[in-house]
Image (spheres, grey):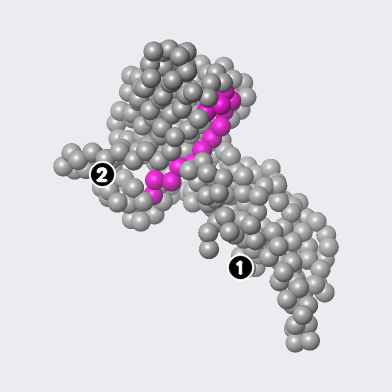
Amino acid sequence: MTNELRISIGAGMALVLAMLLTIGSGCHKIPNGGIPIYIKIDSPTIIDDGLVGNINWKIPDVYVAVNNTDLGGYQMPATVPVLSEGDARMIVSGGVYKNGIVSQRADYPFWRPDTFTIANPQAGQVYRHHPVYHYYSDVQHGLLDDFNAGTQFDSAMTVVPDIDADSLSGRVWQCGALVLGANDSIKGTIQRIGSTIVTNGREAYVEFNFKQSGTSQAVSFDVGLQSVSSTGYTTNNTILTIFPTNYWKKTYLDFSNFVGSNTGSTFYVYFVGYNTSGAPVNFYFDDVKLLYLQ
């Protein structure tokens, strides 16, 4: 079942289950008389365990299970009906828009689920929970660039102060800038020193923050991953073209298949900016990460 389908049906799953149990009540005891409890989930947090550098996030979805029963996915904030008797052992996981596409939702594979128990819940009651997620302790990285001590990209990427106090990091630091003049229709930058990555069929993602200096709709940038094999064969995988706003956004890009198909290659993150506006534009980047699991 796709994640988007799970999202669409998740909110009604528990109540449908309640109806089915009511129909069959002659044979089965109905938990709590068919009256669910409700778990209100909002305001998720990612804890910095020192594993992947600066921590910031965008978590639009949550996936929920109770007592080992999968209840599906929900858009945040969510109020989840749970038909369960006795202690409710909850597992919630953070979901993202995979590749920046709202219709492609994914349980982000690098965050450890939040687990908690609601002891002796009362039917009809609402229980509120703010999830706390941690990156898995075995997460690997091929790139961590927060631009606060220079940059790991080539000379086309400059380091500038991040004057936006509303930066996703919550603090004013430095960020990277890909600067295109009025006559620059295209300009790219690539990671200087790549990493040899082996995932053994597991996940690999690039996550980063981005914005542009203005509001023009005539500018965009590509983001991709380049692989260089042991024999020097080069392949570029551009996964997404982004039309940025003038305020910070975050995206999560799934390169799992590309990395898995080029096992043992050296990988480099790259950005390519396009400008047809006739005016200068800066593309800004921050907290660029290439993460993977082995």
Q: Residue at x 62, y 56 (%)?
A: 7
In front: 248, or 103?
103
Which numbered tag is attached to residue 265? Answer: 2
115 above or below 290?
below
Mark 2 belongs to which amino acid?
Ser
In front: 173, or 74?
74
164 above or below 34?
above
Q: Is residue 75 left or right of residue 161?
A: right
Mark 1 belongs to which amino acid?
Asn
Q: Earlier in the sequence, mark 2 or mark 1?
A: 1
Q: Is residue 36 left or right of residue 212?
A: right
Secondary structure of residue under mark 2: loop
Could you say where residue 117 lies in the image, as x and y percent from the top left?
69, 60
Q: Residue at x 81, y 68 (%)?
A: 35
**Which residue is the site of mark 1?**
68
Q: Dot 2, crowdedness within 10 Å: few (<14), some or many (≥20)?
A: many
118 above or below 44?
below
Q: Nearer the viewer, mark 2 or mark 1?
A: 2
Secondary structure of residue under mark 1: loop
Q: Is residue 250 left or right of residue 120?
A: left
Q: Dot 1, crowdedness within 10 Å: few (<14), some or many (≥20)?
A: few
Could you say where residue 29 lies in the image, as x and y percent from the top left?
77, 81
Could you say where residue 132 lies in the image, as x and y percent from the top left?
63, 47
Q: Is residue 254 part of the magenta span, yes or no? A: yes
Where does the magenta region start and end? Answer: 244-256
In front: 269, or 19?
19
Q: Residue at x 77, y 59 (%)?
A: 38
Q: Is residue 170 part of the magenta span, yes or no? A: no
